[in-house]
Image: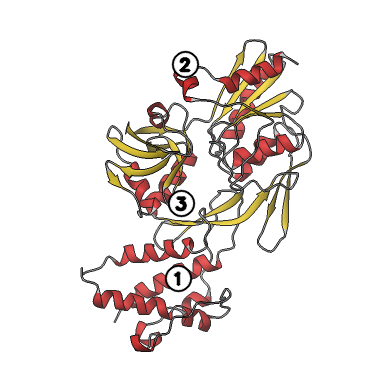
Amino acid sequence: MENKALRSCLITVAVLILLSTAFLGGFTIASVLPVNPIRQVLALDPTEVIPTFQASTVQPQEPTEPIQVSSPEELEELFMPFWESWDLLHKNFVDQPLDDLALMRGAISGMLAATGDKHTSYMDPMQFEQANAEMEGEYTGIGAWVNTTGEYVEVVSPMKGSPAESAGLKAKDIVIAINGEDMTGIPGDLVLKRILGPAGEAVTLTVRRGEETLDFTIVREVIQIPVVEYEMLEGDIAYIALYTFNELATQQLRLALQDLLAQNPKGLIFDLRNNGGGYLVTAIEVSSEFINNGVIMYEEYGDGSRETYRAQPGGLGTEIPLVVLINEGSASASEITAGAIQDLGRGTLIGVTSYGKGSVQNWIPLRTEKGGVRITIARWLTPNGNQINEVGLTPDIEVQYTEEDIEAERDPQLDAAIDFFMNQ
């Protein structure tokens, strides 16, 4: 007989995910749901719910339409095949004993992956801690925003001044091997664990970049997440680079704007290149620094309803001529801001097409084992109603940034932004 408490824990986690509806916006972590009678009812002993399994009588049937359950009894019946499989695995698998914790985590990962949404996934305790540390300002690793939810881990963008950037990693690089070991079929969270590690130790990533396969050996460091850098350029042009939309971004952006605007610049270049995003609330606040009124974005839910996010009053940079730099590493919150500026005619976008992440996730901690889940709760639209998921934003002025430019230490996208103002 299986352990009753373990079964209760697994069912509790499953129901928690199935019933999660809390939303705080963007990537902000929401509180877990309170105890409810459904979870209490489902704390059953395996022998009470699993009938004797007869292989010869099982006739697999493909459902013709989605199956939904609405009562504890239906949910209990729905999970019978799961517990059958659980029991059969423990009774028959060649290598015993099995790691029940790993099986439980694998079950959650598989359930969320079955949604078909690459941004809905399970994060084990280590991954959940690292993900939140990145938003808080410091963690140990190579310094790159990555997407762990696809077939392979994909680099969204390297962080400014990071070991990943110095080594030459780029947005859209696909990690296919680590230290010579093939990562095909390895879950993204496990791949991430192998990338992360103690400061001072090296890790070799083999990446696929288009048709090329490249190796990068990177020494891990304690990564201080950069937020804002700014300066006055020649020709009285202000420049601000924003690297993440964390909880410090709005305050630091305002300080930069105060300093630069006091010098009466003729225009402002707002650099969102390789900014992998962050909190939704911060995206609205940052956008509002440049847009004095109007819609910033719409959030569209599964039932077709929408929530409208409008510019907040008090922005410091709502009048200055504006250019926004974007590239393939500009994602999520960066695209919200750039999309609003473009649709409202507030500024000119220069660079190349952005990453294309047009959905909103809620990060929810699992109190039962300190991991967490991220669940796509909505898709967002630009003020003109455009959905940019898997498409990205097309710049008003396209300017490439090539390998030759990097080697020659020139920045044609920034140069194009400067020329834009000089020719006004």
Q: Residue reaching furthest front?
A: 211
Q: In this view, does 105 lie above or below 90?
A: above
What's under tag 3, amino acid-wise? Answer: Gly
Between 66 and 120, the one lying in front of the other is: 66
Residue 253: quadrant of the picture: top right
Q: Is residue 142 above or below residue 11?
A: above
Q: Residue reaching furthest right?
A: 293
What's under tag 1, amino acid-wise? Answer: Thr
Whether residue 395 appears in this view of the structure is yes
Characterize the local packing of mark 2: few (<14), some (14-19) or many (20 or more) Cα atoms within 10 angstroms.
few
Foreground: disc 2 or disc 3: 2
Characterize the local packing of mark 3: few (<14), some (14-19) or many (20 or more) Cα atoms within 10 angstroms.
some
Q: How far apart are marks 1 and 3 (CA)?
A: 27 Å
- Disc sitting over residue 408 in the figure: 2
Instruction: Give the image location of residue 184, x and y in percent.
Output: 35, 51
Identify the secondary structure beneath mark 2: loop
What's under tag 2, amino acid-wise? Answer: Ala
Residue 83: quadrant of the picture: bottom left
Q: Is residue 219 above or below residue 58?
A: above
Instruction: Give the image location of residue 139, x and y in percent.
Output: 40, 38
Q: In this view, does 279 lie above or below 269?
A: below
User: In the rendered view, does 188 fall on the left or right side of 235?
Assistant: left
Query: Which residue bears the numbered disc 1?
Result: 12
Of callouts 1 and 3, which one flags the residue occurring earlier in the amino acid sequence?
1
On-image quarter of the N terminus: bottom left
Query: Which residue bears the numbered disc 3?
Result: 150
Instruction: Give the image location of residue 348, x and y in percent.
Output: 71, 28
Identify the secondary structure beneath mark 1: helix
Foreground: disc 2 or disc 1: 2
